[in-house]
Image: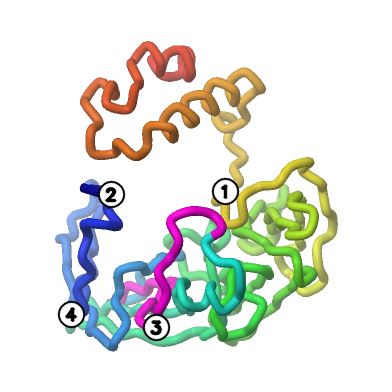
Amino acid sequence: FDTSPGKIAKLEKGAATLHLIPRLESKKQPKSFKISFDGAVEAEVQIINAYEEGDTVVLDAIRSDGSHKSGNQAAQWPWASSHDEYKQNAAKRSLWRYTADLKTGTVTKDLLSDQQCFFGNVSPSDNTQKHDNIFMAIGGMGTEIAPPQGIARFNVNSKTMDAWMPEAHEFCGEPMFAAKDGSSSPDDGYLLTVVFNGKTEQSDLLIFEAGDVSKGPVTRLPIGMGIPHGLYGCFTTGEEARWGFDEIQRRAKLSDKMESRGNLWNEVKSDFSGLGLRFDDMEEYFGDSFLS
């Protein structure tokens, strides 16, 4: 009996609920709003950013619509061997704005862009603030279902897109924003992404000027190996993330051990022994940082 979440969870077609939970120090009360059902289930909404504006809360998100799916998605790589097979198994993704009216208790939805898109984010300084631009990966076939391939900057005010597309055999992953030192605006920085070459099966790190994506990467750095397409990442200037080689090795060992036992997700015990891990393992892999 397969107890993995994908096998036992059932998706209901109907209205969704948006919950707004205030921070602990806030005196505001939690609120819940119904999101009307329009034929696409709101089960996989990837929120990019949210902010308050007067008596409303605005959320920009990438919405997935898998109602057209006709294929049986393979359980192992490669999930698709042709574009037609990919379209049968992948969801249509588009960029939407949800606006929750705190007075009326209603939620409206507006399509910002029907371009196939993935991995949306904003400049870190814009998090929870009103933003002008969204950075994201886009498909190479416009509004048609396609895997992430290019990089784009979408302006939510003018609804215009500044995009760059690599060669037909190359596929970009998530764009990560890195602010310039002494930046003068929230979008003054660089976009970093990993591009996978389908011919050589090698990956490069690409760096773009965030304000001029269509110009193409300002530099391209070979990584020397193939990075799985679609791998998530982040950029930080924090000292806590500037690990040395030994620290990375310890964390990689723990990650490998957890992944090897990942099919036992529902057998985890309080001491992690259900995953074949002990607190001694944590100390070994994380060092003193785990105990502090």
Amino acid identity at mark 2: Ser
Badge 4 is on which residue? 105
Residue at 76% x, 49% y is 202
Tag 1: Cα neighbours inside 10 Å, few (<14), some, or many (≥20)? few
Position of the C terminus by quadrant: top left
Q: Quadrant of residue 81?
A: bottom right
Q: Earlier in the sequence, mark 2 or mark 4?
A: 2
Amino acid identity at mark 4: Gly
Tag 4: Cα neighbours inside 10 Å, few (<14), some, or many (≥20)? few
Q: Which residues are magenta?
A: 55-78
Q: Does residue 57 show up magenta in the picture?
A: yes
Q: Along the horizontal axis of the image, is 220 left or right of 125?
A: right
**What is the x, y in percent for residue 99?**
33, 79
Give the numbered dot on residue 233: 1
Mark 4 or 3, closer to the camera: 3
**What is the x, y in percent for residue 261?**
37, 32
Mark 2 or 4, closer to the camera: 2
Give the numbered dot on residue 68: 3
Mark 1 or 2, closer to the camera: 2
